[in-house]
Image (spheres, rainbow, N blue to C red):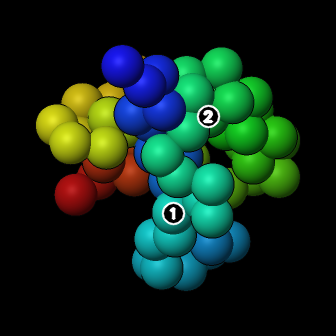
Amino acid sequence: MTTKVWNLMYALGSTARVVGDADNPQSRASALKGASVIEKNGWRVWVEHHKTGKRIHESALEIAHRKQA
């Protein structure tokens, strides 16, 4: 059984363009580490299960964005 089931997703800058990391799907630790780096850049970022879409991490900017929608 593989543990690489997490997708690292982010919105580029202030655009609405959503991008998946080139290494998706990846391990939980790798995805969360990548999210931390992207979050420091001030971008919206989240980590979700590649099949169910269940999110295990969302940046504060992503949470605020989803509340506005």
- C-alpha distance separating marks 2 and 1: 11 Å
Give the residue furthest to the left: 52
**Residue at 56% over, 38% down:** 26
Name the residue carrying label 2.
Answer: 31
x and y percentages locating residue 52 in the rendered image:
16, 37
Name the residue carrying label 1.
Answer: 20
Front-most of residues 27 and 21? 27
x and y percentages locating residue 48 in the rendered image:
37, 37
The amino acid marked with disc number 1 is Gly
Specify the quadrant of the image occupied by residue 11: bottom right
Specify the quadrant of the image occupied by residue 28: top right
Q: Does dot 1 land on a helix, a strand or a loop?
A: strand
Q: Which sits earlier in the primary sequence, circle 2 or circle 1?
A: 1
- Relative horizontal placement of residue 27, taking residue 39 as reference (left or right): left
x and y percentages locating residue 43 in the rendered image:
67, 56
Q: Does dot 2 land on a helix, a strand or a loop?
A: helix
Specify the quadrant of the image occupied by residue 15: bottom right
Front-most of residues 52 and 17? 52
- Relative horizontal placement of residue 52, taking residue 14 as reference (left or right): left
Q: Is residue 23 above or below residue 6?
A: below
Q: Residues within 10 Å of mark 2 (few under 14, many from 20)?
A: many
Q: Is residue 43 above or below residue 60?
A: below
**Residue at 39% over, 52% down:** 65
x and y percentages locating residue 37 in the rendered image:
82, 40
The amino acid marked with disc number 2 is Ala
| Residue 62 appears in view | no
Q: Residues within 10 Å of mark 1 (few under 14, many from 20)?
A: some
